[in-house]
Amino acid sequence: MIARDDRLRRNDEFDRVRSQGRSYSARHLVLVVLPNELSQNRYGFAAGKRLGNAVRRNRAKRLMREAIRAEQPHLTPGFDVVIIARNSFPQDLKLDTVAEQLGSLLTKSGLRVVPSETSDTSTEPEASG
């Protein structure tokens, strides 16, 4: 679960991110990012009524929350992030697909810190002496 301090909760917070933020879109998701003055990221999730009934909307938000939870340690802090399920979000969409699309959007937005393979020295053999 995402901590209470790490969530966007008020409508004006969502509206500010939506109006002033930069958006990136994929087939089933839209990612909107806006820098904040905090030391952590805050996340908001949205699924409009066009997506379907409450069961479908809540399932979409659960999948998006789970996908971002797995990505959280790899993200640059200091941003407000809104993730929106598009109307094309299928009822039977799997977490793997949501995570893949969200991952590509996070990379495209520059939020995801991609670890460089050259900085990892743990794979080098140790010198014996």
Image: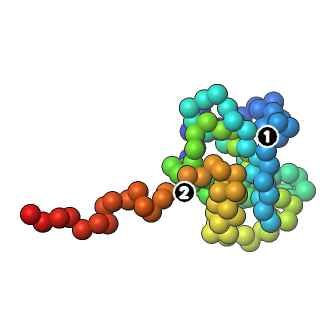
The first of marks 1 and 2 along the sequence is: 1
Report helix, strand or loop for mark 2: loop
Above or below for 126 versus 35: below
| Residue farthest toward the left in the current orientation of the protein | 129
Residue 80 picture quarter: top right
Q: Nearer the viewer, residue 117 or 21?
A: 117
Q: CA distance from mark 1 to mark 2?
A: 22 Å
Instruction: For residue 64, say whether it is visible.
Output: no
Report helix, strand or loop for mark 1: loop
Disc 2 residue type? Val
The image position of residue 24, as x and y in percent, is: 78, 54
Q: Nearer the viewer, residue 125 or 72?
A: 125
Is residue 43 rendered to the left or right of residue 53? left
**How busy is the neighbourhood of tag 2: few (under 14 within 10 Å), some, or many (20 plus)?**
few
At a point 67% along the width and 62% down the height, the residue shown is: 104
- Residue for badge 2: 114
- Residue for badge 1: 21
The image position of residue 31, as x and y in percent, is: 75, 51
Instruction: For residue 75, say whether it is visible.
Output: yes
Q: How many numbered circles are shown? A: 2
Q: Nearer the viewer, residue 85 or 21?
A: 21
The image position of residue 43, as x and y in percent, is: 67, 42
Q: Nearer the viewer, residue 57 or 17?
A: 17
Quarter the C terminus occupies:
bottom left
Residue 56 picture quarter: bottom right
At a point 79% along the width and 40% down the height, the residue shown is: 21
**How busy is the neighbourhood of tag 1: few (under 14 within 10 Å), some, or many (20 plus)?**
some
Disc 1 residue type? Gly
The image position of residue 72, as x and y in percent, is: 55, 49
At a point 72% along the width and 70% down the height, the residue shown is: 93
Mark 1 vs mark 2: in front: 2
